[in-house]
Image (tube, coloured by chain):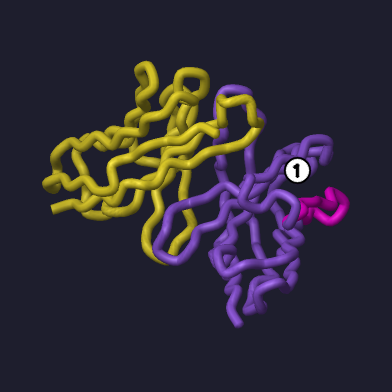
Amino acid sequence: EVQLVESGGGLVKPGGSLRLSCAASGFTFSSYSMNWVRQAPGKGLEWVSSISSSSSYIYYADSVKGRFTISRDNAKNSLYLQMNSLRAEDTAVYYCAREPPSITAADFDYWGQGTLVTVSS
Amino acid sequence: SSELTQDPAVSVALGQTVRITCQGDSLRSYYASWYQQKPGQAPVLVIYGKNNRPSGIPDRFSGSSSGNTASLTITGAQAEDEADYYCNSRDSSGNPRVVFGGGTKLTVL
């Protein structure tokens, strides 16, 4: 059974940092691109970042570029999101999502349960 | 960057058919994927590719596309289909990124 379990969320002050983790199991983690998607309270889904299976390709939304860093450790079946210079508008539930190989779409076929990040003084 | 536009809210009578649409330039180049999200839960993929359903998704869910518009159709809507629905696709503006629609709140009457 495919499982994605996020952790690392919490309350942080503006300007602070936080590192999210996503532990994957039930599939060959090293064969899939992975993504972070967030959802602010009462709002829609926002794609944050993606990383290819071998970490060769990394992309960010403009809203987080230069502040967030995505990474992965295929030996540990884990995905990470280092978040620096956090702002109030980064407050959201952060989901990790698996992305099967595709050149015609962006299918996120499995999602974790999410971890809440609250940026407030 | 590309945008995907969805109607904020749609309603359907129990057992009737409803279509939820998603518009954007990127849909001329890429398929839309559709996600169902119920309150307090993570999104679930319901339609991907031309018109494919992941295992466990009822066959009352189907997808289609024409030009810059993708549609999710629920034929014979059930009470449990009441949820938020989101589309996404790759960004076709030259950025290798992903875009989501703003979401559609489906109410089953």
- B59 on left or right of A53: left
Q: State the purple chain.
A: A
Instruction: Using the image as rendered, state which of residue A19 and residue A3 is in the foreground.
Output: A19
Instruction: Using the image as rendered, state which of residue A41 and residue A29 is in the foreground.
Output: A41
At 21% from the left and 37% from the top, the residue drawn is B18
At 18% from the left and 51% from the top, the residue drawn is B108
x, y percent for residue A69: 77, 54
Return the residue at label 1: A28
Which shade is chain B?
yellow
Q: Classify B27 as above or below A38.
A: above
Q: Classify A23 as above or below B78.
A: below
At 63% from the left and 79% from the top, the residue drawn is A11
Residue A45 counted in the magenta span: no
Q: Classify A18 as above or below A94.
A: below
x, y percent for residue B61: 32, 36
x, y percent for residue B38: 37, 58
Question: Is residue A101 in view from this perspective?
Answer: yes
**How many residues crowd mark 1 within 10 Å: few (<14), some (14–19), many (20+)?**
few
Instruction: Using the image as rendered, state which of residue A55 and residue B82 is in the foreground.
Output: A55
Q: Secondary structure at mark 1?
A: loop
Residue segment shown in magenta = A68-79
Q: Chain of mark 1?
A: A
Residue A73 counted in the magenta span: yes
At 40% from the left and 53% from the top, the residue drawn is B37
x, y percent for residue A60: 68, 44
Question: Is residue A2 in view from this perspective?
Answer: no
